[in-house]
Image: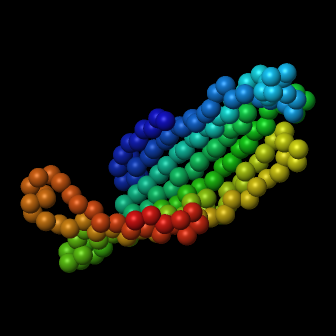
Amino acid sequence: FTSAAFNGGSLGSFGGAFMRFGVDDIPQTDSTLNPDGSPHELGSFSQQDFGFMLSWGKSWHKAFSAGLTLKYLSGGTVGLQGSAGDASYTYIGPDLGFLINFGGMTSALDGLSLGLNLQDLGGGTGVQWKNTPTSPTDTVDTNAKVGLAFSPQMQFLKQANSVINFAIDADPKYGSNT
């Protein structure tokens, strides 16, 4: 994983990231067995996923910020033996986020914030598979997440250059965390 970001002043902040996940040397077997009963290996293959992301965010008011990320994901297998060959996929999709800092509206609410994250807004392009038996395009549903956080503004914490956060979030599609 590698990433970079910079402050573009009144235009907002910009960022980019690259990720790679992979597993190498996965044994490929067929349905036959060796004389000792072990699976007959044809060789090995790898599986890898790549992600490229470009992001932009801007504080529109001391109480309101928004951001957008465009992501490109691709991956598949490398080195599969046989007539099927390697399978691969691609996906392009946007994420949109909002942050409300209630302390920016009134000092009585300093430290209270609410966030909303809309992942895969509009479903993107769908996951487009290639070189599979059916080469489908899988739909990707939007995932709406919301979170609430409170950071008490206590003088002794500020003097110690510290902060305490109490947070809860809801992720109805994939489960909630606290």
In this view of the protein, which residue sits in the foreground, 116 or 27? 27
Q: Is residue 29 left or right of residue 121?
A: right
Residue 49, quarter of the rendered image: top right
In this view of the protein, which residue sits in the foreground, 129 or 72? 129
Query: Horizontal and vertical percent for residue 131?
Result: 84, 39
Residue at 81% in and 41% down: 130
Query: Horizontal and vertical percent for residue 128?
Result: 76, 48
In this view of the protein, which residue sits in the foreground, 59 or 43? 43
What number of labels is visible? 0
Residue at 21% in and 58% down: 163
In this view of the protein, which residue sits in the foreground, 33 or 70? 33
Residue at 88% in and 29% down: 32
Query: Horizontal and vertical percent for residue 172?
Result: 55, 70
Q: Is 56 placed above or below 172 here?
A: above
In the rendered image, which quarter contains the C terminus? bottom left
Residue 103, quarter of the rendered image: bottom left
Q: Residue furthest right?
A: 83
Q: Is residue 7 visible?
A: yes
Q: Is residue 104 visible?
A: no
Query: Horizontal and vertical percent for residue 73?
Result: 64, 44
Residue at 76% in and 55% down: 138
Q: Is 110 placed above or below 3 here?
A: below
Q: Residue furthest front?
A: 36
Colouring chosen for the image of the structure: rainbow
Q: Is residue 98 left or right of residue 111?
A: right
Q: Is 52 placed above or below 149 here?
A: above
